[in-house]
Amino acid sequence: MEIDINKLDGFEFIHGVGDVDEKQLCLLSATAYLAGEPHGDHPVCACPVLTELGIKINDGPWWADNAERGVWVLATAPRLIGTRSSKAVERQRADILVRAALTEFVPDALDHAARALELAGLQEHANTLRDHATKLRTAADAAYAAAAYAAAAAAYAAARAADAADAKTSIRDRLIALMDECLAITEPQPVVAEGHVS
């Protein structure tokens, strides 16, 4: 399928699904539009895992304005066309995102929450959160990670309240890098466990 990116000339790229008649699209509605699919943010041509990640990146608070978002949408939307694949590929893409959530994003949220607790004079609670963050960053034990994830939900909400532009940009850039890593998986990859390839 030949993709004509020029079809997107004159569109504004916004938070939310947008409206073709208003010349406004998000990442996924731009993908659907380029693929000739009906308007929506869950195009059939795109991997469901990448779709959900794309929505989170598109709608996140890290864009300076719609023009900045548009540069990314124009570069990414064509790449999502044709990414729907086997369940094995979807699973590997999801595994990349789960691993990053549990070993990067949740520990960072716990660290931010710990800083807030320190400022409130609650050092013992801050230390507990920092211990969980350290364990998550190095956890090979999925059961521990799942349990700690539940405990971290409140910490994530607290960290989200912080309005640090550098932190938001850093998170956005890491999510985009994860999208690129997931896009590189087009066929099931061998699973490596304890030094053995299966």
Image (spheres, rainbow, N blue to C red):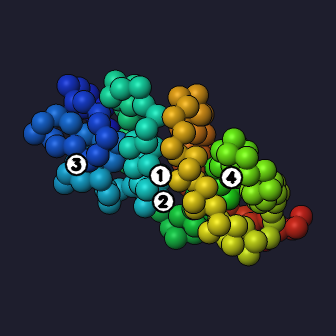
Quadrant for the C terminus, please: bottom right
Q: Where is residue 107 in the image (x, y as percent from the top left)?
A: 70, 52
How far apart marks 2 and 1 lie (CA) works out to 6 Å
How far apart marks 2 and 3 lie (CA) works out to 21 Å
Nearer-N-terminus badge (1/4): 1
Q: Are marks 4 and 2 in contact (CB under 8 Å)?
A: no
Q: Say which residue appears at 59% left-offset and 34% top-offset.
A: 167
Nearer-N-terminus badge (2/3): 3
Labelled disc at residue 49: 2
User: As drawn, is 179 to the left or to the right of 82?
Assistant: right
Residue reaching furthest to the left: 21
Residue labelled with disc 3: 36
Q: Is mark 3 on a helix, strand or loop?
A: loop
Quadrant for the N terminus, please: top left
Name the image quarter holding residue 88: bottom right
The amino acid type of the residue labelled 3 equals Gly
Residue labelled with disc 4: 110
Which of the two discs, 3 and 1, sits closer to the camera? Answer: 1
Labelled disc at residue 176: none
Q: Position of residue 103 (x, y in %)?
A: 72, 55
User: As drawn, is 90 to the left or to the right of 6?
Assistant: right
User: As drawn, is 123 to the left or to the right of 50?
Assistant: right
The amino acid type of the residue labelled 4 equals Leu
How far apart marks 1 and 4 lie (CA) works out to 22 Å
Name the image quarter holding residue 91: bottom right
- Vertical side of 117 occupied by 191: above or below: below
Residue labelled with disc 1: 53
Q: Do the residues labelled 2 and 1 touch (CB within 8 Å)?
A: yes
Q: Say which residue appears at 22% left-offset and 30% top-offset.
A: 11
Which of the two discs, 3 and 4, sits closer to the camera? Answer: 4
